[in-house]
């Protein structure tokens, strides 16, 4: 359950921003935004005027929405078409300018709403939502810590059960089953309709050297050309570098962590690259403080990789590099801000990032690490609990 | 690999439809549509003019796209912004009216493309795509049969390993791991941005009686208010009805099947309801023939459920019933046509449906069945291979 004061503060923050940019109200539809601002993910629309009480219009299923949400005004509706007149009845006026989630709302749906709110100017409200969600409260950070604990245990489990002969996909199924026993929700949420989130990014040996469609240093083989990323049917073998990038979700909050594994050992080149990635990771953490900008951190990681001799492989092979070294994380796997080229956003206390310096040696292997940290008044604090090291295990 | 003649026929069909409705070309962006029309899911845009050769513009990663796709004209691009001038160079003219996937394309993305294709009228091209995909070729049906074989083996496995004390989520992890070993891709694809596909719809005992946000007879408990559907943390026990609705995907093609399980036995009321669901399922299969309309099949299922004494629970409890008894299935879990109220589409050979008559006794349990069938010249043929029966197992 999301505490009532959390919901209250989130809505207040959004209302202040609405007033600042001259929006009269906002309609929230997308499931994650809805959960963030209301505490329920039941099929609903949330109307937040720029002042006063919000109203949750619930299509299905009102008893659960009422139990989960601290929104006081909840109205059960049979159809979305009832909403404009219900807004008029409740607030005695219609918003002149209405914000909607134009970053996710499909064109056909938007046209339906534009017609429904005839005479209302519908504008993009998503920047307000992203800005509200960009810094996390102490309560949210405690939720992320709970997910990190689940993920820590899952990485421990991986060390116990990894063995040669398992396929990448099969191994991912094993550790996900373990994680589900602890509450892992299975479905990673990604906002962009063209990005598919999944928790089985196991890239062993040459799989780690496969570039592909993902906006990630390496895509892996995947299970088929229809889904050409993540774990595939390759079997894990001894003495190869195995990159395991696991996305865990508990009560809606995501943690995204990567560790290098080796059964027995890994080639020296991969070992050295893994150590270099850990060094870059640790040096960025030292540098991440309020006021430092995201693009400065990104540039720092590039310079450091170069000085360590990994310019060519860092963040992908030449010609196919990604231009970020970290991303915000929370109720979605990828959230603003991004620690990227040309995106100079100053770090603020409460921001939470997945930091993922990785090297890709095309057609050979990947090496890297990923942890989640939050920005505090004095610097960066790891939320991740998984040891910052290479996991070498002996075959049983 | 999708055979070249498949791609050729798919594109021809779309081109005929474009000519019929007066569209000059279509741009395909969404991953599943792209895979359907090109054979690759690499990050690309496919331009199909209403006559002549299509062009695949690949952003990432061209070597894999070229290996996977039989499209002859493949151009590697650095940015989407290059596309209009490349179309002009290639075809010596711009389309006057351009179809786009307005059912999935977010407003902000659409506005970007509208600006990019300045002077071109951008209209909704998604009806063409849906219509092209609505009937499946023999090759596609053979792919669905391969997925059905995987699913059949997975249901056999469930019978072997189900036992009291496993949580719903844990049990789902176990059978998904088994399925992944056989090639199951893990990620179920659903077109609607508000619907989240997942393979762990295990609803045991009272979980089956929980109505929720899903457009399904029952939603289950889910893992938290953030994801309040599907399997949850409830443990399986003896002598309760357990509904397992498993979505499997192999090489991009989905199968969606449901069976009732019981460890030892289930209460007589649940047993009788399960048998009634099987009867409705079988009678609909007898009736499904080319020319019969989807709404007639739906109405037939309602009448039959009433005559069997299940009017109140059929397709959900009173006030919360869904208005469909089946849905198209293929590269996405849910595709047109839907076997639903007020959607009178005549069945045609090659159409493939998941048929799912289900009863929900609110706060008590669900009972039902689901199989996948295709329409042939003479009637309905089951693609599903799982026995049409209730699975009762003895605890070990």
Image (cartoon, coloured by chain):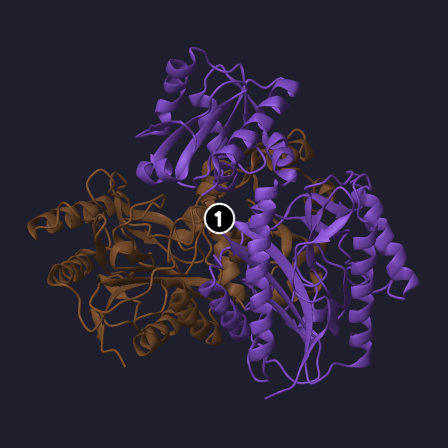
Chain colours: A brown, B purple
> For numbered disc 1, what is the local secondary structure?
helix
Q: Position of residue A168 (x, y in %)?
A: 36, 63
**Which residue ends up furthest to the right in the rendered image?**
B307
Who is closer to the viewer here, A34 or B93? B93
Tag count: 1
Q: Count residues near mark 1 (Cα–Cα under 10 Å), then give few for <14, some for 14-19, many for 20+.
A: many
Query: Residue B340 at x, y = what percent?
Result: 77, 47
Q: Is residue B290 left or right of residue B15?
A: right
Observer-nearest of B312 and A349: B312
Residue B124 can be seen, yes or no:
no
On the rendered structure, is A349 left or right of B322? left
What residue is rendered at 53% in x and 14% in y? B96
Above or below, B3 against B385 in this view is above
- State the quadrant of the C terminus of chain A: bottom left
Quarter that holds the N terminus of chain A: bottom right
Look at the image and tell me whether residue A64 can be seen: yes
The residue sitting at the top extreme is B92
Tell me residue B162's x, y (percent).
58, 79
- From the viewer's side, name the closer residue of B307 and B318: B307
Which residue lies at the image location 61% right of the left edge and 51% below the top edge?
A54
Q: Where residue A103 sits: x, y (%)?
A: 48, 39
Residue B228, by quadrant, is bottom right
Subunit under mark 1: A
Q: Residue at x 39, y 73 (%)?
A: A150
Return the residue at label 1.
A14
**Residue nearest the observer in this picture, A283 or A201:** A201
């Amino acid at each position: 359950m999301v505490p009532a004061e959390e919901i209250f503060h989130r809505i207040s923050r959004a209302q202040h921003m609405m007033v600042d940019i001259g929006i009269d109200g906002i309609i929230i539809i997308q499931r994650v935004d809805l959960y963030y601002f209301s505490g329920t993910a039941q099929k609903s629309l949330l109307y937040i005027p720029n002042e006063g009480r919000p109203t949750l219009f619930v299509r299905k299923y009102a008893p659960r929405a009422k139990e989960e949400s601290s929104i006081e005004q909840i109205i059960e509706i049979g159809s979305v078409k009832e909403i404009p007149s219900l807004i008029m009845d409740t607030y005695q006026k219609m918003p002149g300018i209405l914000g909607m989630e134009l970053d996710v709302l499909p064109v056909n749906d938007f046209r339906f709403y534009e017609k429904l709110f005839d005479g209302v100017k519908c504008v993009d409200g998503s920047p307000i939502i992203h800005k509200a969600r960009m810094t996390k409260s102490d309560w949210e950070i405690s939720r992320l810590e709970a997910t990190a604990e689940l993920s820590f245990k899952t990485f421990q489990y991986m060390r116990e059960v990894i063995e040669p002969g398992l396929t990448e996909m099969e191994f991912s199924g094993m550790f996900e089953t373990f994680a589900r026993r602890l509450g892992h929700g299975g479905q990673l949420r990604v906002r962009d309709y063209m990005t598919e989130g999944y928790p089985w990014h196991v890239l062993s040996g040459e799989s780690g050297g496969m570039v592909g469609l993902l906006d990630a240093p390496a895509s892996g083989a995947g299970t088929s050309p229809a889904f050409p990323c993540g774990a595939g049917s390759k079997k894990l073998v001894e003495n190869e570098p195995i990159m395991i990038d696991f996305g865990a979700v508990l009560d809606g909050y995501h943690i995204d962590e990567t560790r290098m594994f080796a059964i027995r050992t890994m080639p020296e080149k991969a070992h050295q690259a893994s150590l270099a990635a850990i060094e870059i990771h640790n040096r960025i953490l030292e540098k991440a403080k309020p006021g430092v900008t995201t693009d400065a951190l990104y540039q720092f990681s590039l310079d450091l990789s170069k000085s360590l001799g990994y310019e060519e492989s860092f963040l992908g092979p030449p010609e196919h590099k990604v231009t970020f070294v970290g991303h915000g994380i929370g109720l979605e796997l990828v959230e603003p801000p991004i620690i990227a080229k040309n995106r100079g956003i100053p770090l603020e206390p409460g921001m939470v990032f997945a930091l993922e310096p990785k090297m890709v040696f095309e057609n050979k292997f990947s090496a890297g690490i990923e942890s989640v940290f939050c920005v505090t008044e004095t610097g960066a604090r790891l939320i991740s609990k998984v040891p910052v090291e290479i996991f070498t295990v002996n075959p049983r």
